[in-house]
Image (cartoon, rainbow, N blue to C red):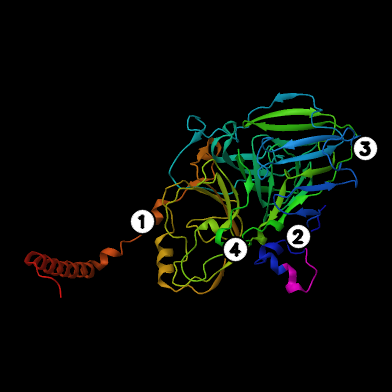
């Protein structure tokens, strides 16, 4: 079991992970004090890990006989012939291969989940209205991670191999002898309340609020929780999460490669033959399979198709040190490419503690209409970019090209005062799931009692300040027109009389 923190908000109260190093006066550490596991660091690397040293074959992947009689099993995340920089695959050396199972049976549809977001689906809705949801309650009845999935919005369909879905999860019970496989896409998981102890085929991950993890397509997991647990998921189809390009920032900044952590092999005991249930999600449908061996019996593995986690307090914010806001792409932690080189399928952005020093600059988010669909959540703290009640666990949604911004009172206050140099978002992390694709809303979210609209009346008193200056503007325009007529007349007369300028 993980150690308990003497101060449960210890990592929420810090401004940045750098504070844990005490200015070099103590030995540095890479994970939170209550994280019970060890990890490998990097992003996109080819990793390897052995629970028993000397297990991984050298010089080949699939020898005639693997040590200890293990089976070699390859898991691919791309086509075999994908280019080297895009190719994703791993080899697992395990007590019994995943193929040893007893077939599949259909499970009843979960009415709270959805995968087809095309408008021909009567179970989804499209609307330009700015929507929000109060935090989804954790059920009182026993609910594990899989049963607790609730889909909010998305785009496309997993069978088309491009699109995405946004979910929340609520749970109060650990998964028993069951595992979950998402055969549709990669899941970016954002805990908001309660930690997730995730057993994977590659080893364990401990992920708590303020951290995220990515479980790649087809990888089996078992999720344990301790008490009421809630969070968010962004699932992508036909793409992979990657780091955004840094451009003129250079080699460092935003989410640094070495801060991503991957599990180490830690196989389950294989002596017993207790039955296990495997729940598969494919095409948004759920299927069950049974097997008489543990799905987490991997003794060693190597490859680059591996789950990972990242601590958001390690994000290196960048920003303006003169005037104006830089576009919110500077807050991008991970991005997923689409077939359109000018528009990603999805971005994951965070708004975390940072300095704001831009002078003569309007501090709140400027009024804007942009091409992206934006679904926001709050992990902890208070987010100042919302004009309505926005508490941890809430959801806020704005579709592309719909205008949004703060109420007049905030506009007036921010416009009247010179903003000092300040630390903003202290003790807070908000995030955004952003996509170039339009979202449709699920039946579950559309009919949820937690749904409420952003009140349009909040913008009713955005007064027309320009009209108050009518006399001044008319005078300026009159002077301009009079001067223009004189200049035009002089130019016309000179040209007509053939007089050359001297």
Residue assigned mark 1: 460
* Mark in the foreground, 1 or 2: 2
For disc 1, the neighbor class at 10 Å (few under 14, some 14 to 19, many from 20) is: few
Q: Which sits earlier in the primary sequence, circle 1 or circle 4? A: 4
Q: CA distance from mark 3 to mark 1?
A: 73 Å
Helix, strand or loop under label 2: loop
Q: Which sits earlier in the primary sequence, circle 3 or circle 4? A: 3
Q: CA distance from mark 3 to mark 2?
A: 35 Å
For disc 3, the neighbor class at 10 Å (few under 14, some 14 to 19, many from 20) is: few
For disc 4, the neighbor class at 10 Å (few under 14, some 14 to 19, many from 20) is: some
Image-based side of 107 in relation to 402, left or right = right
Magenta portion: prevailing SS class:
loop
Image-based side of 356 in relation to 77, left or right = left
Residue range in magenta is 20-32
Measured as percent of width and height from the top left, residue 148 is found at 66, 40
Q: Nearer the viewer, residue 282 or 123?
A: 282
* Mark in the foreground, 1 or 4: 4
Q: Are marks 1 and 2 in contact (CB under 8 Å)?
A: no
Does the segment drawn in magenta span residue 128?
Answer: no
Measured as percent of width and height from the top left, residue 389 is found at 52, 56
* Circle on res. 32: 2
Helix, strand or loop under label 4: loop
Residue assigned mark 3: 68
Q: Nearer the viewer, residue 170 or 428?
A: 428
Q: Are marks 4 and 2 in contact (CB under 8 Å)?
A: no
Q: CA distance from mark 1 to mark 4?
A: 35 Å
* Circle on res. 317: 4
């Amino acid at each position: 079991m993980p150690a308990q923190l003497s101060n449960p908000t210890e990592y929420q109260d810090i401004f940045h992970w750098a504070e844990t190093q005490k200015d070099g006066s103590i030995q540095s550490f890479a994970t939170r004090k209550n994280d019970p596991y060890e990890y490998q660091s990097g992003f996109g690397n080819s990793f390897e890990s052995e629970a028993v040293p000397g297990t991984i074959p050298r010089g080949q992947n699939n020898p005639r006989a693997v040590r200890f009689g293990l089976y070699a099993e390859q898991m691919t995340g791309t086509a075999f012939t994908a280019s080297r920089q895009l190719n994703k695959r791993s080899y697992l050396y395990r007590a019994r291969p995943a193929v040893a199972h007893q077939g599949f049976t259909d499970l009843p549809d979960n009415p709270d989940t959805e995968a087809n977001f095309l408008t021909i689906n009567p179970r989804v809705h499209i609307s330009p209205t700015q929507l929000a949801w109060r935090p989804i309650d954790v059920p009182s009845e026993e609910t594990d991670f899989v049963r607790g999935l609730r889909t909010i919005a998305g785009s496309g369909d997993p069978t088309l191999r491009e699109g995405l879905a946004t979910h929340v999860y609520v749970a109060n019970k650990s998964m028993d002898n069951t595992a979950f496989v998402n055969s549709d896409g990669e899941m970016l998981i954002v805990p908001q309340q309660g930690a997730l102890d995730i057993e994977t085929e590659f080893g364990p991950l401990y992920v708590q609020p303020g951290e995220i993890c990515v479980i790649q397509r087809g990888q089996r997991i078992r999720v344990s929780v301790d008490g009421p647990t809630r969070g968010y998921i962004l699932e992508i189809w036909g793409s992979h999460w990657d780091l955004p390009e840094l451009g003129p920032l250079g080699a460092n900044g935003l989410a640094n490669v070495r801060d991503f952590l991957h599990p180490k092999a830690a196989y389950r005991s294989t002596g017993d033959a207790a039955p296990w249930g495997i729940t598969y999600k494919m095409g948004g449908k759920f299927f069950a399979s049974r097997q008489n061996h543990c799905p987490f019996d991997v003794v060693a593995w190597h490859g680059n198709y591996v789950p990972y986690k990242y601590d958001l307090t390690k994000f290196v914010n960048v920003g303006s040190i003169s005037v104006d806001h830089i576009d919110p792409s500077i807050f991008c932690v991970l991005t997923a490419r689409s077939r359109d080189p000018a528009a990603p399928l999805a971005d994951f952005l965070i708004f975390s503690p940072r300095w704001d020093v831009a002078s003569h600059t309007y501090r709140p988010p400027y009024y804007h209409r942009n091409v992206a669909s934006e679904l926001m959540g709050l992990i902890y703290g208070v987010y100042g970019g919302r004009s309505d009640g926005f508490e941890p666990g809430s959801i806020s949604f704005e579709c592309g090209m719909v205008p949004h911004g703060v109420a007049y009172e905030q506009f007036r206050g921010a416009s009247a005062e010179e903003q000092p140099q300040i630390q903003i978002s202290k003790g807070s992390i908000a995030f955004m799931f952003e996509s170039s694709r339009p979202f449709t809303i699920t039946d579950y979210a559309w009919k949820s009692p937690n749904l409420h609209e952003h009140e349009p009346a909040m913008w009713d008193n955005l007064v027309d300040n320009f009209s108050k200056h009518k006399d001044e503007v008319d005078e300026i325009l009159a002077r301009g027109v009079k001067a223009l007529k004189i200049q035009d007349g002089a130019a016309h007369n000179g040209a007509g009389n053939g007089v050359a300028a001297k």
